[in-house]
Amino acid sequence: MNATIKLELRQKRRFRIRKKVMGTAERPRLAVFRSNKHLALQAIDDQKGATLASVFTHEKALKGKFKGNNKAAAKEAAAILAQRAKKKGITKMVFDRSGYAYHGKVQQIADSMRENGIQI
């Protein structure tokens, strides 16, 4: 299976999930994006169309701590996002895995958010 077909299948899964998952101010959507080098996590209020909190593995707080885009980086990024969300009074989120399998880094993100007091 070539890369284009894999991407198209993931996009189909992503759109199918997005039809069902909606974030609000009280319970924002935790959106996950994976690239080959980095991870991006965002708490999004879909009613306003605004990002409430975000973290990227290439930002200053995480840059250079981890070699590449791995589970340890995912866990640390999720912990930082949980802290930022708590500062804004967010304790519950809806998990949007963006079509990625709930395995590896994506699972590590969800587990770390739960460990840090965010209900998913």
Image (spheres, rainbow, N blue to C red):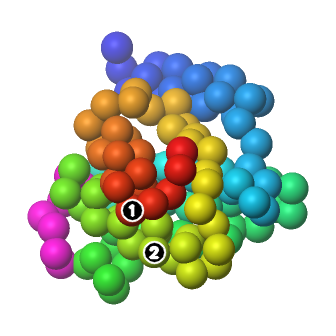
User: Which residues, given as a range, are shown in magenta?
Assistant: 64-70
For the point 31% across and 31% down, which residue is it?
Answer: 103
The picture places residue 99, in percent across and down from the top left corner, at: 52, 31
The picture places residue 17, in percent across and down from the top left corner, at: 65, 28
- Tell me the number on the disc at residue 116: 1
Q: Can you identify the residue that label 2 sits on?
A: 83
Q: Magenta region, mostly helix, strand or loop?
A: loop
The picture places residue 102, in percent across and down from the top left corner, at: 39, 30
- Tell me the number on the disc at residue 13: none
Q: Can residue 20 be seen at all in this image of the molecule?
A: yes
- The kind of residue on which mark 2 rests is Gln
For the point 51% across and 38% down, which residue is it?
Answer: 97
- The kind of residue on which mark 1 rests is Asn
- Look at the image and tell me in which quarter the C terminus lies: top right
The picture places residue 119, in percent across and down from the top left corner, at: 53, 50
Residue 112 occupies quadrant:
bottom left
Label 1 crowding class (10 Å Cα cut-off): few <14, some 14-19, many 20+? some
Kindly report the distance in space between the C-alpha atoms of the residues bearing marks 1 and 2: 8 Å
Label 2 crowding class (10 Å Cα cut-off): few <14, some 14-19, many 20+? some
Q: Nearer the viewer, residue 97 or 37?
A: 97
Residue 54 occupies quadrant:
bottom right
Q: Position of 52 compared to 2: left or right?
A: right
Q: Nearer the viewer, residue 105 or 67?
A: 105
On screen, 7 above or below 36? above
For the point 34% across and 73% down, which residue is it?
Answer: 58
Q: Position of 29 compared to 85: left or right?
A: right
Element at label 2 = helix
Q: Can residue 39 be seen at all in this image of the molecule?
A: no
Marks 1 & 2, CB-CB < 8 Å contact = yes
For the point 47% across and 50% down, which residue is it?
Answer: 33
